[in-house]
């Protein structure tokens, strides 16, 4: 269990991380898909896309393109899946956000699938747990 209350990880690849927030699914969806919100939990990266299946995603940090991606699955307020790459020759990382209503809020699950070069458990936790915890803090404000 992480030092961050309510956030946990599981292994092996693909990995899943989960947290609970006292927010509704629409608010979580807006946090995941509005470029004005994503920087608060994605290490300062704004994610811009039309959020339609097969649409490109551009992850930018202060006007500079940092990562690219492509939308894989869209079920508004329930599921968002996309791949992320540092460059066209780099292996993709597949992210799936699942939003499930729970009493008093929602449970958010992040599934991370690093197909070609998976991080070990500690590396994965160092990357993904702080991101999920930052989303949790953002939605709790």
Image (cartoon, grey):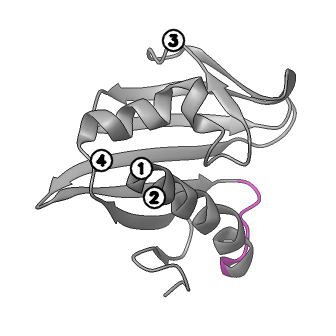
Residue closest to the eye, 16 or 76: 76
- The answer to whether 117 is drawn above or below residue 70 in the figure is below
Q: Is residue 117 magenta?
A: yes
Q: Which residue is mark 2?
A: 136
Taking 10 as reference, is 24 left or right? left
Residue 119, quarter of the rendered image? bottom right
- The answer to whether 56 is drawn above or below residue 94 in the figure is above
Which label belongs to residue 50? 3
Cβ atoms at labels 1 and 2 below 8 Å apart: yes
Cβ atoms at labels 2 and 4 below 8 Å apart: no
The nearer-to-camera label among 2 and 3 is: 2
Residue shown at 66% from the left, 79% from the top: 121
On the image, the x and y values in percent for residue 3 come to 56, 86
Q: Earlier in the sequence, mark 2 or mark 4?
A: 4
For mark 4, give the secondary structure: strand
Q: Earlier in the sequence, mark 2 or mark 3?
A: 3
The nearer-to-camera label among 2 and 4 is: 2
Q: In this picture, which residue range is highlighted in magenta?
A: 116-121
């Amino acid at each position: 269990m992480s030092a961050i209350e309510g956030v946990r990880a599981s292994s092996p690849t693909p990995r899943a991380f989960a947290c609970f927030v006292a927010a509704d699914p629409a608010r979580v969806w807006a946090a995941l898909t509005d470029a004005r919100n994503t920087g608060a939990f994605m290490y300062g990266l704004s994610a811009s896309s039309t959020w339609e299946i097969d649409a490109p995603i551009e992850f930018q940090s202060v006007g500079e393109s940092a990562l690219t991606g492509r939308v894989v699955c869209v079920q508004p307020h329930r599921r968002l899946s996309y791949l992320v790459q540092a460059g066209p020759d780099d292996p993709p990382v597949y992210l799936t956000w699942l939003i499930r209503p729970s009493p008093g809020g929602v449970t958010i699950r992040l599934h991370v699938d690093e197909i070609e070069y998976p991080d070990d458990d500690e590396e994965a936790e160092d990357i993904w747990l702080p991101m999920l915890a930052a989303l949790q803090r953002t939605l709790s404000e």
